[in-house]
Image (cartoon, rainbow, N blue to C red):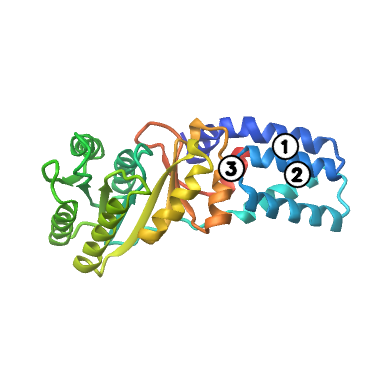
């Protein structure tokens, strides 16, 4: 299945919620206050967020008025242009050697994301080592080992309860000695309001900076698309601990509220770099704004 087809299939629920309703709304062809009130309600209901919704509506109102638009197809095309403009279309570009740290709260799919990223990079003919720095959760390293076997990549792990920073140190040493292209660090799921766990994340970050300064650094925060607006507070708090370079939005196929992508971009100015649209090992895709817009509208 092609990547575009996967995106379209993965966004079916969001398209059913927002795309079909928008089509009906625009078909009326009357762009008055009632129309904009209905549009606002629809966008907010799809988790587009207050800031992004305001930007979209203000610009649409201005464009329709300036161009004296009465044709519904033209009006809808303008909406697509505006919504695409809200998205940060910052494509993920891999520069090697690269160290990618994966963070997030419990249950968002970090370990699965690590496995799928490893598979993606191996398919691009990159050598990969996975660092099992989640030493707290029972059987976490075993779960990650299964993913490493599926992706056919190496894994560095210690015993349960070990110091995560020590695992990171060993993984970096191994990567440097073997000239590995990508190090993927799986960190423990942490509640974003637990100060000691956030301090540990900072420690891991410092170890990477100290031990492998020449490597390209990427910190990815994994968010569950089904949590909606709660995801925004997670980004803000994790940003206080480490720099967040991009978002991995999982379970996008399981929600009708994929509009959270707009809220993340507009309010937090952090790009969505990958989206999960299924449970298969090949179902983690690089985010593309144009495909996303086509998928939901």
Residue 213, compared with residue 51, is above or below; it is below
Can you tell which mark lies on residue 173? none
222 horizontally vs 133: left or right: right
- Residue where numbered disc 3 is placed: 259
Q: How packed is label 1: few (under 14 Cα within 10 Å), some, or many (20 or more)?
A: some
Residue 209, compared with residue 61, is above or below; it is below
Please state the horizontal and vertical placement of residue 35, each as a whole percent of the image: 81, 41
| Callout 1 touching callout 2 (CB < 8 Å) | yes
- Residue where numbered disc 2 is placed: 76
Dot 3: element: loop
Foreground: 206 or 129?
206
Q: Which residue sits at x=41%, y=58%?
A: 239
Q: Sequence-wise, which precedes: disc 2 or disc 3?
A: 2
Please state the horizontal and vertical placement of residue 113, each as a whole percent of the image: 34, 42
CA gap, disc 1 and disc 2: 8 Å
- Residue where numbered disc 1 is placed: 22
């Amino acid at each position: 299945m092609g990547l575009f087809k996967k995106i379209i299939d993965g966004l079916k629920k969001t398209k059913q919620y927002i795309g079909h309703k928008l089509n009906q709304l625009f078909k009326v062809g009357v762009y008055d206050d009632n129309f904009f009130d209905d549009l606002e309600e629809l966008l907010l209901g799809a988790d587009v967020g207050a800031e992004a919704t305001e930007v979209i509506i203000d610009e649409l109102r201005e464009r329709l008025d300036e161009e004296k638009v009465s044709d519904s197809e033209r009006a809808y095309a303008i909406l697509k242009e505006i919504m695409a403009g809200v998205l940060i279309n910052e494509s993920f570009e891999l520069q090697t050697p690269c160290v990618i740290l994966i963070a997030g709260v419990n249950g968002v799919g970090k370990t699965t994301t690590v496995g799928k990223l490893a598979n993606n990079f191996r398919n691009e003919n990159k050598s990969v080592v996975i660092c099992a720095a989640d030493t707290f959760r029972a059987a976490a390293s075993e779960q990650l080992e299964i993913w490493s076997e599926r992706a056919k990549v190496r894994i560095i792990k210690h015993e349960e309860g070990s110091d995560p920073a020590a695992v990171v140190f060993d993984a970096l040493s191994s990567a440097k000695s073997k000239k590995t292209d990508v190090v993927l660090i799986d960190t423990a799921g942490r509640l974003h309001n637990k100060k000691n766990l956030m301090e540990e994340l900072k420690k891991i970050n410092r170890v990477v900076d100290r031990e492998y300064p020449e490597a390209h650094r990427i910190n990815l925060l994994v968010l569950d698309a089904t949590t909606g607006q709660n995801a925004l507070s997670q980004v803000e708090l994790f940003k206080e601990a480490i720099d967040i370079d991009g978002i991995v939005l999982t379970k996008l196929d399981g929600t009708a509220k994929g509009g959270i992508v707009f809220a993340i971009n507009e309010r937090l100015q952090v790009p969505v770099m990958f989206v999960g649209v299924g449970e298969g090992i090949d179902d983690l895709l690089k985010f593309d704004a144009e495909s996303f817009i086509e998928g939901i509208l």
